Amino acid sequence: MTVINENEREYRFGDSGPKYLQRGPRMNFGIVALRPGQDFPAHFHNIMEENFFVLEGELEIHIDSEVFYCKKGDFIHVEPKKVHYLVNKGETDFKAAFMLSPYQEKDKVDVDYKPSK
C-alpha cells in the first residue's frame, strides 16, 4: 500500500505541468495544472490510454481533428494513438487528475501540432 500527498510531489514546470503521484507498475496517476495561457504540447501514446478528470477551471483539448471544451466535473478519455493537445484559454487555473494505463515506461510520442486559431 502507498499513501502520497499531492504536496509531496513537484510539478514538471515549477508551478504547472504534470506531477506524478504514481508511476507503474500497472498505471501512471498524477495531477496536471495549467495557468491561464499555458498549454501542454501535442503528443500521443502507442499503448497507454489516458484519462483526465477536471478538478478546477476550464480546458480546451484537441483530440486528433476534434476540439472539446471541458469544465470542472468533466471526464475525458483519450484512446491510444490519438494525438492530444491541451490549452488553458480561460482566466483561471486549470487542474485535473490524470491516469495512463496499462503502464509503459516510454510510450509518449511528441507531435509537431499547431492548432488553428
Image (tube, rainbow, N blue to C red):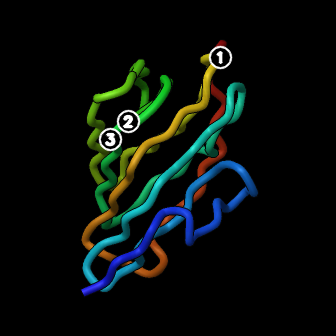
Q: Residue 62 location in percent, x, y? A: 47, 29
- Kind of residue sitting beneath label 1: Glu
Q: Is residue 73 left or right of residue 37?
A: left
Q: Is residue 81 left or right of residue 11?
A: left
Q: Earlier along the polypeptide chain: callout 1 or callout 3?
A: 3
Q: Residue 1 location in percent, x, y? A: 24, 87
Is residue 76 depicted above or below 47 in this figure? Answer: above
Residue 43 disc label: none
Residue 91 disc label: 1
Which residue has dot 2 on it? 54
Residue under the image location 36 percent in, 26 percent down:
72
Which residue has dot 3 on it? 53
Q: Nearer the viewer, residue 71 or 79?
A: 71
Q: Is residue 115 left or right of residue 53?
A: right
Residue 110, quarter of the rendered image: bottom right
Decide: few, some or many residues near mark 2? Use Cα within 10 Å; few <14, some 14-19, many ≥20. many
Q: Secondary structure at mark 3?
A: strand
